[in-house]
Amino acid sequence: MIIKKKYKFYASHRNQYLCGKCGSWHGHRYGICISIIPQHSIAGITMLFSDIDAVADKVIEEYDHACLIDKNDPYFEQMTEMMDSDKRMMKFKVFDCPTSVENIAKEMFHEFVVMGLPMDEIEVQETDSSIVVYNTWDYKGETT
């Protein structure tokens, strides 16, 4: 059995290693679907959706309406100065790598695991036709 929950968030980002529209600041309405491996119980209730929401909302809050930025981006220093001068001006989510949808999926999966969700996979949809799936096999391959 797998439990799935869907969420959405809005964020801006750019990939400093690419030219054209992906190298420029732009935004997306991201859709995510998390799949959880339920912990079976005697009563037949595996996990309440509200318990999943409580964890997911904390993770998604960091991303929603934020500027996702790689700390290696040439603009990072300028953005950090803006962030330090007025925290109300802009919200940032800092990455140790480019803010590609692949890396967003990987980072979110890791954050959900740290928060205690028994993750199976996460799907991150960047556009209507573009989805990245990161799962436990990917995760176990990194942690071994």
Image: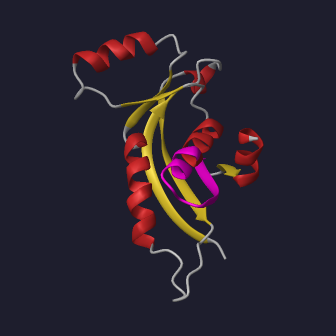
Question: Whole-percent x and y of residue 13?
Answer: 49, 30
The answer to if 21 sits in the magenta stretch is no
Q: Which residue is depicted at the point 52% across and 45% down?
A: 111
In the image, 1: left or right of 72? right
The picture quadrant where one finds residue 19 is: top right
Q: Considering only vertical position in the picture, is 66 above or below 134?
A: above
* Residues in magenta, as a range: 110-127
In the image, 4: left or right of 87? right
Front-most of 91 and 138? Answer: 138
Question: Whole-percent x and y of residue 129?
Answer: 65, 51
Q: Which residue is depicted at the point 59% across and 24% down?
A: 15
Q: Considering only vertical position in the picture, is 57 above or below 24?
A: below
Front-most of 39 and 10? Answer: 39
The answer to if 123 sits in the magenta stretch is yes
Q: Which residue is depicted at the point 57% across and 30% down?
A: 99
Q: Quadrant of the C terminus?
A: top right
Q: Is residue 127 visible?
A: no
Q: Is residue 65 visible?
A: yes
